[in-house]
Image (spheres, rainbow, N blue to C red):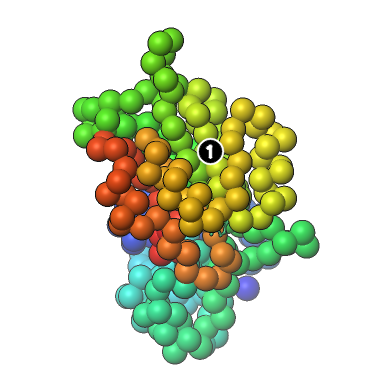
């Protein structure tokens, strides 16, 4: 099969669909791999490395789209969607639920489009979403701590507090992969952490792993109470294949203390 990886064009996207290591694997299995020149620049992989791994370097996205299987990172942008054909297989993150315009274009192209975030293993887990969820969950606390600094317009609160000053109140909505990784970071920094989830087994697992946190069943009343009282709120819910449920209302945000911070990791599914 011919496999193609174009340079990502979405704003600020630095990742690439195939690394030189994965190109080498594909080439060893007899596939022809087309890589757009410069596609690996954002991860520090040069055209020479890709060529050394067995790729053919091409000058444009149009040439990459001559392949049958297109491997990307982010959803195809409008010019990429215009290049999709009915004999293409597109393999990438799509996040279609909040993006009907993209869904319409993909259907019209006739291509077989496989969304990484919906690939499910035998245990019902999402193995292609999970690695990014681990990164995003950990980063959410780092980003939140940054925006809580007064220099960045925050309330001037240290997540872990200091002796004599209470730690920050951190509320994590959704205790899946993003939530668990966010909790790990927030607990590690000494914050007071509350997690809300709808699934009792999720709360049981988190309670066993992090005895110091508070686990709460996710209801409107509980959300209102914990969001309003938090210094940092992390949105980490997922209803697979659907838009994120809207849980944090404008009214709740208005009642939060000035300088509090919300990090909505579920934004790729429309935000919660
Ligand atoms: N922005 C990014 O870079 C990035 C990266 C990875 C994941 N994400 C997004 O983060 C979100 C979470 O991903 P994940 O991998 O942790 O999913 P996950 O399936 O592991 O966890 C989601 C959790 O949300 C819970 N949930 C669903 N509805 C809820 C509700 N009403 N109240 C409380 N909890 C509820 C589920 O029970 C589940 O435990 C998704 O929207 C995903 O697309 C974003």
User: Can residue 44 be seen from the camera position used here?
Assistant: no
User: Can residue 173 be seen from the camera position used here?
Assistant: yes
Q: Count numbered badges in the picture.
A: 1
Residue lying at 52% horizontally and 83% vertically, measured from the top left: 111
| Frontmost residue, 157 versus 55 | 157
* Residue 75 found in image quarter: bottom left
Side of 256 where 6 appears, left or right: right
* Residue 155 found in image quarter: top left
**Helix, strand or loop at mark 1:** strand
The picture places residue 54, in percent across and down from the top left corner, at 57, 56
The picture places residue 68, in percent across and down from the top left corner, at 55, 77
The C terminus: image quadrant: bottom left
Question: Is 118 above or below relative to 199?
Answer: below
Residue lying at 64% horizontally and 65% vertically, measured from the top left: 119
| Frontmost residue, 160 versus 196 | 196
The picture places residue 235, in percent across and down from the top left corner, at 45, 50
Question: Is 115 above or below relative to 189?
Answer: below
* Residue 32 found in image quarter: bottom right
| Frontmost residue, 63 versus 161 | 161
The picture places residue 135, in percent across and down from the top left corner, at 51, 43
The N terminus: image quadrant: bottom right
Q: Residue furthest right?
A: 122
Residue lying at 66% horizontally and 55% vertically, measured from the top left: 199
| Frontmost residue, 257 versus 52 | 257
């Amino acid at each position: 099969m011919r496999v193609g990886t174009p340079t990502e064009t979405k704003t600020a996207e630095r990742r690439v669909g195939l690394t030189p290591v994965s190109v080498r694997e594909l080439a060893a299995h007899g596939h022809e791999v087309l890589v757009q020149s410069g596609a690996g620049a954002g991860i520090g992989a040069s055209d020479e490395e890709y060529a050394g791994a067995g790729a053919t370097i091409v000058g444009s996205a149009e040439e990459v789209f001559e392949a049958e299987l297109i491997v990307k990172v982010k959803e195809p942008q409008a010019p990429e969607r215009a290049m999709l054909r009915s004999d293409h297989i597109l393999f990438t993150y799509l996040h279609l639920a909040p993006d009907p315009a993209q869904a319409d274009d993909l259907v019209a192209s006739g291509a077989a489009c496989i969304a990484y975030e919906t690939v499910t293993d035998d245990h019902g887990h999402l193995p292609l979403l999970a690695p990014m969820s681990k990164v995003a969950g950990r980063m959410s606390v780092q980003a939140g701590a940054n925006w809580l600094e007064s220099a960045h317009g925050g309330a001037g609160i240290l997540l872990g507090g200091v002796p004599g000053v209470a730690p920050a109140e951190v509320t994590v909505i959704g205790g899946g992969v993003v939530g668990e990784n966010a909790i790990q970071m927030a607990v590690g920094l000494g914050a007071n952490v509350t997690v809300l989830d709808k699934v009792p087994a999720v709360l049981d697992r988190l309670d066993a792993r992090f005895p110091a946190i508070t686990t709460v069943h996710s209801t409107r009343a509980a959300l209102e109470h914990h969001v309003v009282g938090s210094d940092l709120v992390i949105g980490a819910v997922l209803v697979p294949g659907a838009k994120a449920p809207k849980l944090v209302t404008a009214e709740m945000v208005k009642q939060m203390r000035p300088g509090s911070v919300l990090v909505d990791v579920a934004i790729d599914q429309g935000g919660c």
